[in-house]
Amino acid sequence: MKKAVDIAKAILVLIIGGISCYYFYLFLGPFGLLCFFSGISLLLLGLGNYWELTLKRPALSGKPLVSIIIPAYRSETYIADTIKSAKRIRWPEKEILVVNDSQDRTPKICEELGVRCIQNRERLGKAKALNLAAKHAKGDILLFVDSDTVLEPDCLEKTVPWFSKPDVGAVALKFVVKNKNHSILTRLSALEANLHNNLFKAEMLFGSLISFRGCGVAIRKSAFDSVGGWPEHLLEDAAMGAELRKAGYRIIYEPEAIARTAEPENLKLFIRQRIRWGKGAFLAFLRSVGFYLKSPQFALQFLPLIFSFFTLTGLFLWQIFWLAPILFLWFTTLSIKEVLLLFSFFLLPHIYNFIFSLFPALTSHTAILSLSEGKKEVLFLLPYLFIFLPFTNFIYLKGILQGIRDRKKEGIDFSVW
């Protein structure tokens, strides 16, 4: 019975929301739509910056032991920089643990740098490896850092005070692209990072994030244990964010704690990463669909897509209303081909006009949210908007389709890593 009621509610929301958005689009027109989305993005940017400017961090009460956990997989060429940055962190009570999921020189590098390394006999995957390391950790706070990420010396001074609030389960560090000058691809990835960081700030207006980037995040040990550790999932950071929120913990975004991470430097690795992210995001959504649909932060991230979906739904419903007599004729004189032809004649021009009205509006929305630090980034804005984002979304779509295909499979397919 409850399922039937939920389905009825969803259909009602779809009908009311769809027709409302369609009328909203008709009222605004193409130029109005552009102004609307530009205004929304400026509002989000302004509110996010206001949140950052008025941010009041709690006072530091004591200096608990922090365990810095670094998962490694074929990381021998760059993990030394990560370990050195962890050792430079200004914090008296800390330990550094590396968990190595491959057979390379990482244990030797750890030995040379005086850091403990847990060597796995076989590949466990990132989530299992992190959970294994967490069992060996002694700290009250666990700072998880990717092996290609460099931390700023003051990152713990910025993140640890938040844990004086008992409802805070995790603190996400601000991630920036450390290799952005390597190629045009990494430059464009840096613009995308700006977009995510600005959305994180806007999400904090609701008191918490719902997900985070796993390259740098501090988690309270008791909260970590209460949700069973990292979910063994293709996109474990998104899944962990949902689990912490469902358990009642807040996730804080700390814009002054910097984690400098590396993005793929060639197209092959980039495509592989984004397919994995698309597939993982879809599976994470299926895992906690009720939670996401009730979260305003989720709607905030996908506002343009939600508006587009509702508007097209409303357009379709409105056309059905007007073409109802034709549907009636179908039962008497018209063939199904003739009915579809009439639908196409009336419906397709509206869809065409809407899509081409929406495109500049979405472009403006994305551009404003991606240019947080401006300057040289402006030069890369056109390829970012018209090449990088469409291409990236196409790759995400491929990952989502793989997720739909593999949604019932058990375990993680390491071939996508």
Image (cartoon, rainbow, N blue to C red):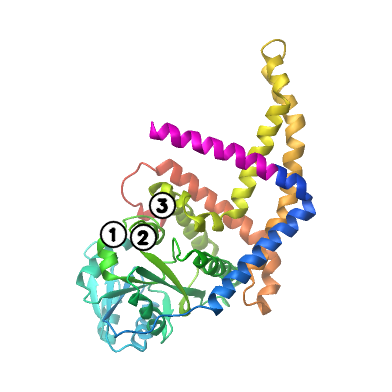
Closest to the observer: 202 or 192?
Answer: 202
Q: Are marks 2 and 1 in contact (CB under 8 Å)?
A: yes
Query: Which residue lies under the disc numbered 1?
Result: 227
Residue 256, x across and y down, in percent: 48, 80
Residue 27, x across and y down, in percent: 76, 47
Report how far apart the C-alphas of labels 3 and 2 lie in the structure. Answer: 9 Å
The magenta region covers 1-22
251 is within the stretch colored magenta:
no
- Say which amino acid is labelled 2: Met
Residue 76 found in image quarter: bottom left
Tag 2 or tag 3, which sits nearer the N-term? 2
Query: Which residue lies under the disc numbered 2?
Result: 240
Residue 44, x across and y down, in percent: 61, 66
Element type where label 2 sits in the image:
helix
User: Could you tell whether 203 is left or right of 144 in the image?
Assistant: right
Element type where label 1 sits in the image:
loop
